Amino acid sequence: MLLGIDIGTSSIKGMLMEEDGKIVSVKSSGYPVEIPRAGWAQQDPALWWEGLCDVLAQMRQERPDILDGVRGIGFSGQMHGLTAVDREGNPVCPSIIWMDQRATGELGEIREKISAGEQGRILHNRVFNGFAMASLLWMKNQDRRTYDRIYRVFQPKDYIRYRLTGQMGTDYSDASASLMLDVGKREWAWELLEKLGIDGSLLTPLGGSWEIAGAVTRKAAGQTGLPEGIPVVYGAGDQQAQSIGNGAVREGRMISNIGTGAQISAFSASDFYDPELRTHTFCHAVPDAYTIYGAMLTGGMSLNWMKNQILREDSFEKLGQMAETVEPGSGGLVFLPYLSGERTPLMNPDAKGVFFGLTLKHEAAHMVRAVMEGVTFALRDSMEILEGLGVRAERLTASGGASGSPVWLQIQADILGKEIQVCRSQEQACLGACILAGVGIGVYPDISAACGRLVSFEEKVYRPRSQYAAMYEERYRKYHGIYQGTKNWM
């Protein structure tokens, strides 16, 4: 069996899979995001480890010897954040995660010392809040005592892999998403780090996502119930792992993912980036390949906010039922889903959420559907940029929590103007992690072959409905006009 572990923003998931793709067990364990002050977002790395131990304990409750057959372990993990440890491997502070906005002041320093041309040529990305480079510079400037205690920095999945193996390191996909990697050369961007006065010795060795990084130690075996000595591969960032789990490992494949955030991503065999830096280009988990995508900060989180903070509802299924009662267009109501600033293409940490067009006729169901439509408008922004760069696909694969919502899948088809398909596996990131583990230990010859064997899609395909095309074009223009008209007040 193979074990795939996905360290998400709100929970950690584990999936046991037979080598032929049969799912043996899927378990999860939740944990909170700390918001100690406005604009901050952090997590205690100990919670990830406790979550993993809980997931494995749940599996053993099904069958005490269930973990005995595990041959390899792979990882997927939330990207961009900063996890810093001392020489003993203990976190020196909470992990500053991807949605954090505290480094706004440091962005000016970065722009002064690293030109936009250098950011594009070397990093292939514009440096922004929530990325490890900006967070590490913030720590150096604002919390020097903690900075001076750091021995190594890496990403969330790398911390869990370190706890399992005792080996520190990261893979190329997560390293590129830290914005401290020379993406074209696949080595740390030493020159840029020197300009910022960041100590390059804080960075770890690099490896391919499918390469073996270590093995489960005796100590970790005692804590988790895993057999000692199981090979553990480096793993990948969640977007890259999810791409593998959705079979997007060749040109012409594009994914619409709506989870906590939301992304439109595409596979690229060539190294290129948007010269205007409106999108992200990172190393793929597939050897010598890249992923280019647009990312928004509060995709599914916008609907979660509506569910928990406004409607006080218990289930997303109920919200989907509410949205189905409303005609496309939400009765003229438009939602800007910028509840925590926004990344691509706006790159505006001060962007705010807006409901525009509320009247006495609107009910809660209109607001729910407007949230779904607003998030999809934001994804269309990135999709149109990708298409302008020559990245095209006639059909998108929907992923993340929204892929379980028929009404949101149809909204995506209508607004994006693409056919939408859904992978049969509900845990694409864990599947991608399992595939990486399987390639690492030699079960599969390569990632593409594994995807061909293990990835399949539901028969139902959601298609754009021509009768709503003109209306959604008008709403999309209005969506842009509302942001342009209000951004100076945010």
Image: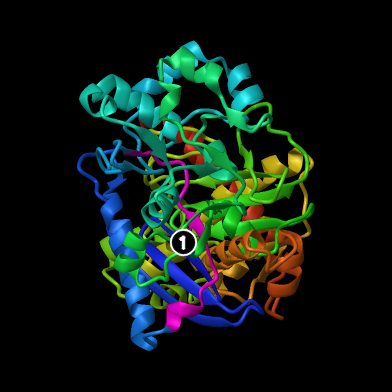
In the picture, the quarter occupied by the N terminus is bottom right
* Relative image position of residue 445 (x, y in whole percent): 75, 63
| Colouring of the image | rainbow
Local crowd size for mark 1, using a 10 Å CA cut-off: few (<14), some (14–19), many (≥20): many
Q: Is residue 280 above or below residue 11?
A: above
User: Where are the magenta residues, as a range?
Assistant: 66-84
What amino acid does circle 1 point to?
A: Asp
289 drawn magenta: no
Along the line of sight, the residue nearer the viewer: 73 or 216: 216
The quarter of the picture where residue 278 lies is: top right
Q: Is residue 253 above or below residue 467?
A: above
Q: Which residue is tagged 1?
A: 6
Q: Is residue 190 above or below residue 284?
A: above
* Relative image position of residue 37 (x, y in whole percent): 21, 39
80 drawn magenta: yes
Answer yes or no: is residue 307 visible.
no
Answer yes or no: is residue 31 visible.
yes
Q: Residue at 39% of width from left, 63% of height from top?
A: 12
Left or right of 314, for residue 373:
right
Left or right of 448, for residue 26:
left
